[in-house]
Amino acid sequence: MKAMEEKILTSGKVLPGNVLKVGNFLNQQLDVNFLTEVGKEMARLFADAGVTKVITIEASGIALATLTAQALGVPAVIVKKHFSANQSKEVYTATIDSFTHKNSYTAVVAREYLNEGDRVLIVDDFLAVGNAIRGLQKILGEAGATLVGCAIAIEKAFQGGGDALRAEGIRVESLAMVESMSDDSVTFRR
Ligand code: G4P
């Protein structure tokens, strides 16, 4: 999606440690009109996949998952990063190591929201090493649901997570694929 690349070039900022800051349209402040178009594009890419649910992990994926689910006309399921008091005890969990944040957390979702026979699209803002998607893949497997693919706003292609998933036959559609970053430039894979 050319518009995503242009948005990164005009609004993104490269921080030390190969981090792309996109807080002004994707992570903290949301450019809702732009993200609505992103959601429509993600839905278009998977329009023929028979998606029954969109899934993401809180927090930054929620907006995109919501807008994509709206465009597909299906529910969005939000996987939590913490158990909460009112969380159902019947849950699926996965331990996810965050390469970027150097921590790990337990992803948790109530069993009632994922069913055998569901065809699930993973939506997220970033794909780096792919640990978050691996965790969701495990949860979907335990639920007996089918992973139809992953729709990603920004793939950091140089971190290899997307290519590893594709090599396993998983459909990964990234709207911008960052090949490399430096202080004053971002190069895309096309
Ligand atoms: P993964 O997402 O492929 O598993 O890789 P990684 O472990 O590196 O990512 C961990 C977190 O860091 C994710 O957010 C991811 O979105 C975020 N992240 C990775 N690279 C970048 C980057 O260059 N820029 C920004 N802004 N974020 C990046 P999270 O822990 O799930 O947090 P949240 O923001 O969704 O709450």
Image (cartoon, helix red, strand yellow):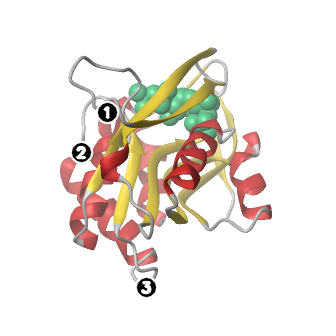
Q: Amino acid at mark 2?
A: Asp
**Label 3: which residue?**
48
Task: Give the Cα separation between the discs numbered 3 and 2.
Answer: 27 Å
For the image shown, how many numbered marks are present on the structure? 3
How many neighbours does mark 3 have within 10 angstroms: few (below 14), some (14-19), or many (20 or more)? few
Label 3: state its secondary structure.
Answer: loop
x and y, in percent, of residue 184 in the image:
61, 32
Nearer the observer, 57 or 13: 57
Which residue is located at x 22 percent, y 71 percent? 73
Asked if residue 17 is positioned above or below residue 167 in the image, the reply reads above
Nearer the observer, 87 or 157: 87
Give the numbered dot on residue 31.
2
Q: Is residue 38 visible?
A: yes
Left or right: 15 as drawn, with respect to 124:
right
Task: Give the Cα separation between the discs numbered 1 and 3.
Answer: 32 Å
Of badges 1 and 3, the one in the foreground is: 3
Which residue is located at x 62 percent, y 23 percent? 100
